[in-house]
């Protein structure tokens, strides 16, 4: 159906309808624009969420990433980031394929509509002008006819009146003829204009207006088709990213399926295994012999005075027993000595092995670079026009130095690794504990038990196993005079010099780099002046001027009769 033939008299309604169609198209473009903004904001929030929960570049996070559930979560975050990218793609496609195209099309649509209705109004004005001219001719013809009729009646009246002169009759006759001629001319003009108007009107309603309305109809149909195409594109934009979104979701599902509880539980063992063996049975302490020695030891007690009670102003069971001011001891992974001597044997071995692997990779990388430059230098020597061979010498020399340094580091770490592996206790040592004290009744108490608690910074736990040796004669040795080193004055200025309460033997070497600690060598005998209060450290004295803290798991303790009682921490 054609608008030109069916709606020839609905010019105003068509004008309103086409304007409503343009408004609707603008509304749809605004809808798509807001949807695009929502997609952009959603993608931004998803990316921020993924970034927020990404693991930080810290030793703790690196340790956590060894677990399968942590790896699965990291994969989920990465897939979620890709998922956000697909929503950005949706926003970009909506903008480029719909919003931009609709904006351009709307401008053209408005221009075409304005042009078509301008032509329609012009045609209407033209036909209205012809109608006015026709009406004017018609009124003139009507008026001339009336005047001619009146003149004829006047002539007939004059002609019938015998009292009127012939001159008057002739004059009336001539006037009537003139009026009849004017009426005839008006009739001719009216007939001519009527014929012309009918032609113009026919052309207006059957040619001009139908053509204009047909253009408007075509414009409206194209608008509707374009709107339908935009709606299809709207759906296709989402459909195009569905496969990639599906892959992202599949990646999340595969990551979740890759979680293995057994593997993670084994990783806990790998991460925290100290290499020590569980402690043996606690030996019986014979207090009867202590009573027999009371008389012989009374002179020693009298000579150095009664052991005074320790002041209660400061608690010695605190977590940081040797912090001076705000300088804190750090035993966290990655922040200790270069040889990882602050770690338990098993963890130290793993760290050293990992460091060796890194160094070997660096050596291989440097070696590959040196080999490549050597080949390039050979090419330059054979073909000087390709480059200067001497220009590569500085870089080759630098690579050689780097390789030597790395090899030296490898040798150093291999030595430390060999040392650790030699000192790793074997499982057979566990069965050698029972019976070691059966032939001794000196009352020495085995305080060398596994430590399953936090060190001062809570960075690792330890378990210790070492063979118990007979040290009854050492336990009864006379302690040297008590002295407090000046470096502890700020922490222990309210304490009296501590008496010796036992002896100990160093099972492992300890560097004692941190403030408040004391370095010991393997097998060294020391005096114990303060028991482990649960923080993993024992206070010992080497001589009158040297005392400090050592890890309880690094020494084998023998407490004397004046000890407060042996404590075993498991």
Image (tube, grey):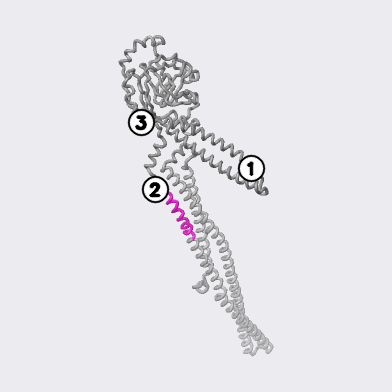
Magenta stretch bounds: 233-256
Decide which of 195, 20 is in the foreground and name it: 20
**Residue that badge 1 annotates:** 392
Q: Which residue is mark 2?
A: 257
Q: Is residue 29 above or below residue 407?
A: below
Image quarter of residue 420:
top left
Q: Extreme right residue here?
A: 167
Q: Nearer the viewer, mark 2 or mark 3?
A: 3
Q: Which residue is mark 3?
A: 428
Residue at 54% across / 36% down in the picture? 406
Mark 2 element type: helix
Mark-to-mark CA distance, 2 and 1? 52 Å
Image quarter where the C terminus lies is top left
Disc 2 to disc 3, how far (Cα)?
Answer: 41 Å
Residue situated in front as seen by the camera: 141 or 570: 570
- Disc 1 crowd, CA 10 A, few/some/many (<14, 14-19, 20+): some
Label 2 vs 3, first from the N-terminus: 2
Residue 236 lies in the magenta stretch:
yes
Residues 211 and 142: in front is 211
Mark 3 closeness class: few <14, some 14–19, many ≥20 residues within 10 Å: few
Q: Quadrant of residue 126?
A: bottom right
Element class at badge 3: helix
Residue 459 in sight here: no
Question: From what the image shows, is residue 170 above or below residue 405?
Answer: below
**Where residue 452 sits in the image (x, y, percent)?**
38, 30
Where residue 294 appears, as percent x and y from the top left, is 34, 12
Task: Look at the numbered disc 1 and give the secondary structure of its residue.
Answer: helix
Q: Which secondary structure class fits the magenta region best?
A: helix
């Amino acid at each position: 159906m054609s608008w030109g033939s069916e709606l020839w008299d609905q010019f105003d309604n068509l004008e309103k309808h086409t304007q409503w169609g343009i408004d609707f198209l603008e509304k749809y473009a605004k809808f798509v624009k807001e949807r695009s903004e929502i997609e952009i904001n959603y993608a931004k929030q998803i990316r921020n969420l993924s970034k927020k929960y990404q693991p930080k570049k810290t030793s703790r996070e690196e340790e956590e990433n060894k677990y399968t559930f942590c790896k699965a979560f990291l994969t989920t975050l990465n897939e979620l980031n890709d998922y956000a990218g697909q929503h950005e793609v949706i926003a970009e496609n909506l903008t480029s394929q719909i919003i931009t195209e609709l904006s351009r099309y709307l401008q053209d649509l408005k221009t075409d509509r304005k042009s078509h209705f301008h032509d329609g109004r012009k045609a209407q004005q033209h036909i209205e002008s012809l109608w006015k001219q026709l009406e004017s001719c018609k009124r003139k013809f009507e008026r001339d006819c009336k005047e001619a009729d009146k003149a004829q009646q006047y002539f007939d009246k004059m002609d019938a009146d015998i009292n009127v002169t012939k001159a008057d009759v002739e004059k009336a006759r001539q006037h009537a003829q003139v009026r009849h001629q004017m009426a005839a001319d008006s009739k001719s003009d009216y007939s001519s204009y009527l014929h012309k108007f009918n032609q113009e009107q026919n052309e207006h309603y059957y040619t001009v207006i139908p053509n204009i309305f047909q253009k408007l109809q075509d414009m409206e149909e194209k608008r509707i088709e374009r709107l339908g195409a935009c709606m299809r594109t709207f759906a296709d934009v989402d459909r195009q990213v569905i496969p990639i979104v599906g892959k992202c979701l599949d990646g999340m599902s595969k990551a979740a399926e890759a979680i293995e509880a057994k593997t993670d539980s084994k990783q806990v063992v790998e991460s925290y295994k100290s290499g020590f063996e569980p402690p043996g049975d606690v030996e019986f302490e014979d207090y009867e012999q202590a009573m027999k020695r009371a008389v012989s030891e009374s002179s020693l007690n009298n000579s150095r005075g009664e052991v005074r009670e320790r002041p209660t102003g400061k608690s010695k069971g605190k977590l940081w027993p040797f912090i001076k001011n705000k300088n804190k001891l750090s035993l966290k992974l990655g922040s200790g000595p270069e040889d990882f001597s602050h770690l338990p044997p098993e963890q130290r071995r793993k760290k050293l092995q990992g460091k060796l692997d890194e160094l070997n990779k660096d050596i291989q990388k440097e070696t590959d670079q040196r080999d490549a430059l050597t080949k390039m230098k050979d090419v330059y020597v054979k073909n000087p026009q390709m480059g200067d061979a001497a220009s590569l010498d500085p870089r080759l020399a630098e690579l050689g130095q780097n390789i030597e340094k790395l090899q030296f580091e490898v040798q150093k770490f291999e030595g430390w690794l060999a040392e650790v592996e030699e000192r790793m206790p074997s499982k057979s040592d566990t069965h050698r504990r029972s019976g070691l004290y059966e032939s001794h009744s000196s009352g020495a108490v085995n305080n060398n038990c596994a430590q399953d608690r936090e060190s001062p910074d809570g960075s690792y736990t330890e378990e210790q196993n070492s063979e118990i040796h007979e040290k009854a004669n050492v336990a009864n040795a006379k302690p040297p005079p008590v002295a407090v080193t000046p470096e502890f004055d700020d922490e222990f200025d309210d304490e009296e010099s501590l008496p010796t309460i036992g002896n100990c033997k160093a099972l492992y070497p300890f560097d004692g780099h941190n403030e408040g600690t004391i370095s010991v060598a393997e097998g060294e005998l020391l005096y114990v002046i303060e028991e482990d209060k649960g923080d993993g450290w024992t206070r010992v004295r080497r001589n009158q001027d040297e005392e400090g803290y050592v890890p309880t798991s690094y020494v084998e303790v023998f407490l004397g009769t004046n000890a407060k009682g042996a404590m075993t921490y498991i």
